[in-house]
Amino acid sequence: MILATRNNGRRDGELLVVSKDRARAARADAVAATLQAALDDWAATAPRLFELAASLERGECGRAFGLDARELLSPLPRAFAWLDGSAYLNHVALVRKARGAELPPTLLTDPLMYQGGSDAFLAPTEDIVAASEDWGIDFESEVAVVTGDVPMGVSVAEAAGLIRLILLCNDVSLRNLIPGELAKGFGFLQSKPSSAFAPLALTPEELGPAWRESRVHLPLVTRLNGELFGNPDAGPEMHFSFAELIAHAARTRPLRAGTIVGSGTVSNEDRGRGSSCLAEKRMLEVLDSGTARTPFLRFGDRVRIEMFSDGVSLFGAIDQRVSRPGPR
């Protein structure tokens, strides 16, 4: 099943069910007004949403209309929690090295994770607004999942069954602000502005065999100003699965339905697959030549993030331009 949220002028938008060809949709307000409402009562709403999706495929849904991706928000325009891991150890090693930080001794056994701002996600085509290029504006192409209610102390096996939806994310980072914030010992705040998510949310079974071991086994494609920047495979080198990340996050507290858990920047050791963020590419340049040649994002730059299967853009595209703040 494919779900989306259309902008209706309200903070949480309106829930849509989307056809498999991504061309048509139907309002789901008879089941749940918003995606969060559907997640809050998933046992009751999911079967009805699946039936609505089936009727849409059969051409029997009288409320179907042509889908305009420009009207779509991030599937959850705001969420109760956004917990971003760092499950690709190649990325962890390179970015830590870039800022002169040691690798944690528990790197292989204890996931890295931070809690980011979740009250105002950007729409998939909304500008990344920054006051200065000196902040070191960077994209981070990621996969993420949305959970149901997760009890405290959940096991990894139990957590796997609590994954409701799969998303793509651009976890925007301001690289030049990160060292100063981390030096204070309290973690990210100003250096992690609003993230954006691809417009379509997929249930795990929608991915078929590409979803296994709580990982997405497909390349994540990032283009910068129209040129291919990277297409690393999101599956094999994800050291901690989404089930493991969820269990880690819920060790000392429950997670409410609608919590989003991110994979961290997708990264492969094979340099031929490119990168999913500028910081990683810059570090590779330093290792090769001693100098980072690739600049961080500049005003007017455009980033596009997608994932394909048989030529189909599964989640739709995150397609964002970097811009200066407008008048308030």
Image: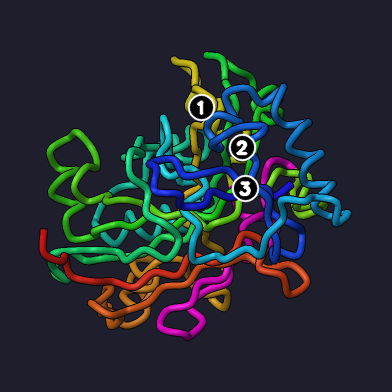
Mark 1 packing: few (<14 Cα in 10 Å), some, or many (20+)? many
Q: Disc 1 or disc 3, which is closer to the eye?
A: 3
Q: CA distance from mark 2 to mark 3?
A: 8 Å
The residue singled out by tag 3 in the image is: 16
Asked whether 112 falls inside the magenta stretch, the response is no
Relative to 260, residue 253 above or below: above
First in sequence: mark 2 or mark 3? 3
Answer whether residue 228 is visible to the viewer in this image: yes
Q: Which residues are magenta?
A: 213-238
Q: Which residue is most to the front?
A: 62
The residue singled out by tag 2 in the image is: 29
The C terminus sits in image quarter? bottom left
Q: Quadrant of residue 235?
A: bottom right
Q: Which residue is most to the right?
A: 58
Which amino acid does the dot numbered 2 rest on? Asp
Disc 2 and disc 3 in contact, CB within 8 angstroms: no
First in sequence: mark 2 or mark 1? 2
The percent coordinates of residue 133 (x first, y second) are 17, 71
Which amino acid does the dot numbered 3 rest on? Leu
Q: Quadrant of residue 134?
A: bottom left
SS class, disc 2? loop
Relative to 280, residue 5 above or below: above
Q: Is residue 129 left or right of residue 211?
A: left
Q: Nearer the viewer, residue 296 or 33?
A: 33
Asked whether 234 falls inside the magenta stretch, the response is yes
Q: Nearer the viewer, residue 22 or 268?
A: 22
Q: CA distance from mark 1 to mark 3?
A: 32 Å
Tell me, for residue 248, which label it has, or none.
1
Which amino acid does the dot numbered 1 rest on? His
The percent coordinates of residue 55 (x first, y second) are 84, 47
Measuring 36% from the left and 37% from the top, which residue is drawn there? 114
